[in-house]
């Protein structure tokens, strides 16, 4: 097999951007070591003058980034990607806000990005496109004559067919997605949901290769960060107050109000726990231009106020709610101080916070992970206490069980999860995906779908 040339990452954001998130931190180290290119939006809202901005070269990685006009960005990002695809893929059809203009804007930005990438490409590049912002990117590329092998990875869940069929223009989007050579999903369930939808809606189209590639973390690096001297010592070292920690982007998929209600129930049912535990919720706001996120923020601050007003006193605060973004070197030692990690999304592609929490634990005295059944991570982390985030009673019970779990059981559960983290880490994820993509022969059938765009 011929070895490919550069790996070309295409994602909504480039890593120079502050909020590039887990994807950037996970991939960057590896990309720096080999000849690679990262292409995406640079976070600037202004008219594109047509010249691709070369942001920086870092070791062997080159970052090429373009600005987007405020209107194009609004339609593509806030409008269709986060107003339709994000809620629908997370089974929140009630929050979906579709408009033809947004959809057209979404296609237009994908077409524009493909056109901007084209002159930067080399013949033997291997192109790896990321996430729901760029579902039709391959179709746009193929129609512009880009022939390089091109794979896609979806970081969020794929909806079951009965939900997916409610997404306007889903058939066109499926056709566009089928222009990729390899479609990667977080879990086998997501992969099956996609294949089943294609069979139902597009029986005539050739479905490309698909696979489940659960994203991982770098457990040893995270463990080392967690062992460092804590920037903040949140809870007394003698464990007289047991810490429960939750860390999320403020997003309606993360189950924050449900979590607060379950915690309130625990406080109500178990007065003997008052003064002995504390929930710290870190949730910096995100996507504040999308109305559903503003509503969520109001709801959550209301619930936090109720809990504090009802149960807090001068000596003890049952809840600490932090909206500020904290860096990993601050977070990792906090995870290690906590007795319980509470990760309870209503639906989540993977959820890396769950894996980071486990990686941060002290092997000799680990905390307990309480994890939603509906996070992709639940397929792998069998040492967690799995809960239904829609059931406050079940969640309160799991918190209680976690707070009082015997040492031997905590260690046994931790060891099982640590083994999973090591066996499916971020480097393995990257290598396995790119190996599979490279092994595929680019075939004529993947070129130029006739519909859409
Ligand atoms: P997200 O929805 O952003 O990502 P998640 O996987 O939990 O969710 O977090 C991604 C990264 O952001 C992690 O490294 C995490 O530590 C960091 N992060 C989250 N909240 C934070 C906070 N309050 N402060 C600081 N850092 C925070 C999407 C999908 C997920 C999938 C990832 C990666 O929705 O299901 O796991 O992509 O594929």
Image: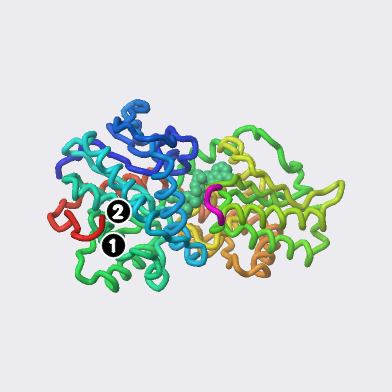
Disc 1 is placed on an element classified as helix
Q: At 67% from the left edge and 61% from the top edge, which residue is drawn?
A: 399
Q: How does the figure colour the protein chain or chains?
A: rainbow
- Please tell me which residue is depicted at 72% across the width and 41% down the height of the picture: 234
- Does the CB distance between marks 2 and 1 fall below 8 Å? yes
**Which mark is on residue 192?**
none
Badge 1 is on which residue? 172
Residue 290 is covered by the magenta coloring: yes
Where 311 falls versus 64 (above or below)? below
Toward the viewer: 430 or 261?
261
**Quarter placement of the C terminus:** bottom left
Nearest the viewer among 203 and 405 is: 203
Q: Residues within 10 Å of mark 2 (few under 14, many from 20)?
A: many
User: Helix, strand, or loop for circle 2?
Assistant: loop
> Considering the image in quadrants, where does the N terminus appear?
top left
- Mark 1 CB lies closer than 8 A to ligand 1: no
Q: Can the viewer see residue 112 in this picture?
A: yes
Q: Does the magenta segment cover residue 52?
A: no
Q: Position of residue 347 (x, y in %)?
A: 50, 61
CA–CA distance in space, label 2 to label 1? 9 Å
In the image, 76 versus 239, the foreground residue is 76
Image point (46%, 53%), residue name: 82
Give the residue at x 31% y 28%. Answer: 60
Q: Position of residue 147 (x, y in %)?
A: 17, 46
Which residue is under mark 2?
Answer: 136
Pinpoint residue 170: horizontal percent, then vertical percent.
Answer: 34, 64
Q: Main secondary structure of the magenta part?
A: loop
Q: Which residues are magenta?
A: 288-292
Tell me: 74 left or right of 114.
right
């Amino acid at each position: 097999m011929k070895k490919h040339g550069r790996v070309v990452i295409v994602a909504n954001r480039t890593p120079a951007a502050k909020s590039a998130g887990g994807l950037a931190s996970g991939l960057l180290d590896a990309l720096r070591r080999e000849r690679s290119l990262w292409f995406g939006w640079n976070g600037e809202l202004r008219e594109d003058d047509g010249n691709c901005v070369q942001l920086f070269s870092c070791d062997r990685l080159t970052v090429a980034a373009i600005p987007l006009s405020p209107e194009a960005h609004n339609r593509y990002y806030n409008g269709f990607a986060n107003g339709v695809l994000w809620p629908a893929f997370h089974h929140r059809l009630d929050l979906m806000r579709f408009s033809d203009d947004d959809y057209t804007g979404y296609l237009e930005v994908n077409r524009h990005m493909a056109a901007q990438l084209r002159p930067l490409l080399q013949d033997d590049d291997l192109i790896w496109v990321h996430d729901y912002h760029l579902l039709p990117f391959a179709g746009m590329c193929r129609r512009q004559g880009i022939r390089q092998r091109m794979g896609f990875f979806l970081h969020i869940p794929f909806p079951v067919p009965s939900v997916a069929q409610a997404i306007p223009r889903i058939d066109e989007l499926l056709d566009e997605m089928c222009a990729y050579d390899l479609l990667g999903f977080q879990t086998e369930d997501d992969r099956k949901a996609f294949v089943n939808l294609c069979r139902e809606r597009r029986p005539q189209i050739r479905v490309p290769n698909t696979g489940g590639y659960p994203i991982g973390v770098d457990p040893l690096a995270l463990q080392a960060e967690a062992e460092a001297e804590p920037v903040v010592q949140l809870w007394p070292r003698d464990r007289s107050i047991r810490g429960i920690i939750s860390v999320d982007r403020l997003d309606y998929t993360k189950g924050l109000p449900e979590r607060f209600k379950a915690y309130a129930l625990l406080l109500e049912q178990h007065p003997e726990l008052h003064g002995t535990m504390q929930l710290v919720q870190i949730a910096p706001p995100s996507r504040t231009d999308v109305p559903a996120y503003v509503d969520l923020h109001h709801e959550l601050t209301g619930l936090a106020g109720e809990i504090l007003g009802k149960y807090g006193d001068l000596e003890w605060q049952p809840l600490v709610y932090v909206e500020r973004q904290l860096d990993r070197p601050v977070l990792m030692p906090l995870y290690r101080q906590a007795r319980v990690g509470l990760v309870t999304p209503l639906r989540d592609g993977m959820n890396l916070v769950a894996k980071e929490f486990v990686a941060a634990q002290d092997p000799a005295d680990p905390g307990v992970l309480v994890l939603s059944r509906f996070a992709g991570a639940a397929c792998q982390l069998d040492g967690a206490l799995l809960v239904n985030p829609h059931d406050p009673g079940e969640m309160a019970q799991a918190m209680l069980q976690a707070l009082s779990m015997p040492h031997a059981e905590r260690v046994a559960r931790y060891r099982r999860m640590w083994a999973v983290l090591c066996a499916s880490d971020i480097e393995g994820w990257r290598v396995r995906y790119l190996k599979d993509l490279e092994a595929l022969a680019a075939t004529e059938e993947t070129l130029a779908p006739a519909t859409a765009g």
